[in-house]
Image (cartoon, grey):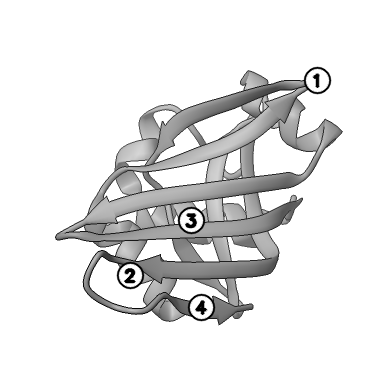
Amino acid sequence: MEKVCEFLKSAGTYYLATVEGDQPRVRPFGTAHIFEGRLYIQTGKSKPVSRQIAANPKCEICAFKDGVWLRVAAELAEDDRVEAKKSMLDDYPSLRGMYDEHDDNTQVLYLKNAAATFSSFTAAPEVHRF
């Protein structure tokens, strides 16, 4: 899990795919944070992505850096605790202009049942499960 988090952070931007009905939706994300042994991402409850995750928690994440790409298939689970939100926002202080751990919009989600696959054209795939 730590290797996955570090790769996402070093890539800077990764892409989160969800579904809305029968339509795939993909958008850039940039948060990856480990809290209490879980890998978290962050969004706002007012965004369509939050509603998509609530309707179907299955997602995929894809990132690319230095000739290596990472795909993570997982389910997202909300953690509504202030401590989890504060930990994320403390790691990403630039988000504090839009989010606060005490507001009704900040949403942190952790990955569960995750299968992360690192791939490249020159090496065999490397799979991590968490």
What SS does tag 2 mark? Answer: helix
Q: Which mark is residue 95?
A: none
Query: What amino acid type should be assigned to the residue bearing mark 3?
Result: Met
Q: Are marks 2 and 1 in contact (CB under 8 Å)?
A: no
Judging by the rendered image, the residue that carries numbered circle 1 is 21
Secondary structure of the residue carrying tag 1 is loop
Drawn side of residue 15 relative to residue 86, left or right: left
Q: Earlier in the sequence, mark 3 or mark 2?
A: 2
Residue drawn where x is 57% and y is 37% of the image: 17
Identify the residue at the far left of this view.
66
Q: Position of residue 118 (x, y in %)?
A: 39, 69
Quarter holding the C terminus is bottom right
**Eye-nearest disc, 4 or 3:** 4
Q: Nearer the viewer, residue 95 or 109?
A: 109
Q: Which mark is residue 127?
A: 4
Going 81% across and 35% down the picture, which residue do you hit?
54
The residue at which mark 3 appears reads as: 88
Say which residue appears at 61% left-offset and 60% top-offset: 84
Query: As shown in the figure, which amino acid type bears the numbered disc 4?
Result: Val
Query: Helix, strand, or loop for circle 4?
Result: strand
Badges 1 and 4: C-beta atoms under 8 Å apart?
no
Name the residue at 64% across, 41% down.
Answer: 107
| Kind of residue at disc 1 | Gly
Give the left or right position of residue 55, taking residue 99 as reference: right
Q: Of residues 1 and 37, which is closer to you in this image?
A: 1
Crowdedness of circle 2 by 10 Å Cα count: few (<14), some, many (20+)?
Answer: some
Reply above or below: 115 against 45: below
Rounded to the nearest angstrom, the CA distance separating label 4 from label 2 is 15 Å
Q: Earlier in the sequence, mark 2 or mark 1?
A: 2
Mark 2 lies on residue: 6
Q: Nearer the viewer, mark 3 or mark 2?
A: 2
The answer, for residue 36, to whether it is visible in the render is: yes
